């Protein structure tokens, strides 16, 4: 799980609190994510931490109270999402479910993995339909679900679109696609390259995913989970 972001846009709301520990409906989002994983039978979780990693470790410990076994992969300097994953590969020797620490994408992770496995893709991306996608990057797919490309945020775009929910099922081959060391972005460097090679599939997930990347998004999620 990628939980090392700086949370710059939430700093005015939460100060130096690590973004994954931001309370949503009275509980840290990271706790809700881990309980969701445990509810689907996922027991072994590696947390990629950076900024505030010690506070995350203090808050969650070994994960036993949430139904999981936690290990921590701590970066000494910011490596980006792809670099953080590369650092964590010493803990993982096969397929992996990867999720962002600031989103909650409540679909069936095993259905996501099945979509990947059945098509022989390196990765499957959970896609969610949003009614207004101007503030989010969009994902274009072809018939059969192959992802054509990832589009950057476009203020001129109006209307609904499929967007990346920050939840992925990857084959073991992913680890060979990551850099040996140094900074790298999963979203900007790795995923577009795999999509261009026809090696990614989109999985149209039902329901709603929650993102706390901005104060506005956090407030919406907080209201929903508090009700």
Image (tube, grey):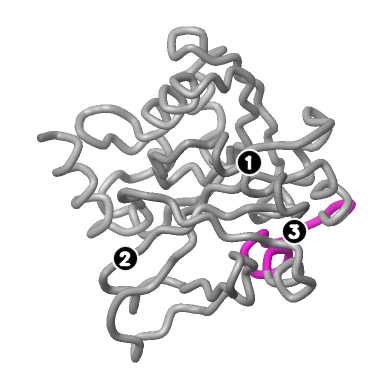
Relative to 42, say whether 160 is above or below: below
The residue that label 3 is drawn on is: 183
Q: Position of residue 31 (x, y in %)?
A: 39, 26
C-alpha separation, residue under disc 2 versus residue under disc 1: 23 Å
Task: Give 180 or 138, whichever is nearer the viewer.
Answer: 138
User: Which disc number belongs to residue 130?
Assistant: 2
- In the rendered structure, which segment of residues is drawn in magenta? 180-191
C-alpha separation, residue under disc 1 versus residue under disc 3: 27 Å
Q: What is the crowding at mark 3: few (fewer than 14 residues within 10 Å), some, or many (at least 20)?
A: some
The C terminus sits in image quarter: top left
Task: Give 32 or 201, whichever is nearer the viewer.
Answer: 201
Labels 3 & 2 near each other (Cβ < 8 A):
no
Q: Tell me, yes or no, whether the highlighted magenta stretch contains residue 175.
A: no
**Among the 4 quarters of the image, the one containing residue 223:** top left
**Among the 4 quarters of the image, the one containing residue 62:** top right
Q: What is the crowding at mark 1: few (fewer than 14 residues within 10 Å), some, or many (at least 20)?
A: many
């Amino acid at each position: 799980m990628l939980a090392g972001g700086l949370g710059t846009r939430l700093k005015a709301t939460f100060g130096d609190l690590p973004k994954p520990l931001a309370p949503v409906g009275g509980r840290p989002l990271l706790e809700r994510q881990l309980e969701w994983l445990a509810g689907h039978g996922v027991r072994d979780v590696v947390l990629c931490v950076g900024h505030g990693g010690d506070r995350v470790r203090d808050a969650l410990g070994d994960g036993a109270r949430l139904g999981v076994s936690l290990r921590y992969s701590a970066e000494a300097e910011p490596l980006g999402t792809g670099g953080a994953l590369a650092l964590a590969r010493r803990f993982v020797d096969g397929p992996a479910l990867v999720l962002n620490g600031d989103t909650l994408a409540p679909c069936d992770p095993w259905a996501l993995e099945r979509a990947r496995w059945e098509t022989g893709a390196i990765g499957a991306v959970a896609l969610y339909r949003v009614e207004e996608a101007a503030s989010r990057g969009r994902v274009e797919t072809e018939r059969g679900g192959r992802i054509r490309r990832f589009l950057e945020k476009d203020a001129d775009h109006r209307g609904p679109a499929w967007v990346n929910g920050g939840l992925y099922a990857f084959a073991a081959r992913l680890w060979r696609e990551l850099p040996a060391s140094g900074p790298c972005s999963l979203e900007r460097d790795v995923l577009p390259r795999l999509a261009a090679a026809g090696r990614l599939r989109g999985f149209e997930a039902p329901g709603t995913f929650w993102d706390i990347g901005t104060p506005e998004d956090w407030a919406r999620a907080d209201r929903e989970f508090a009700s």
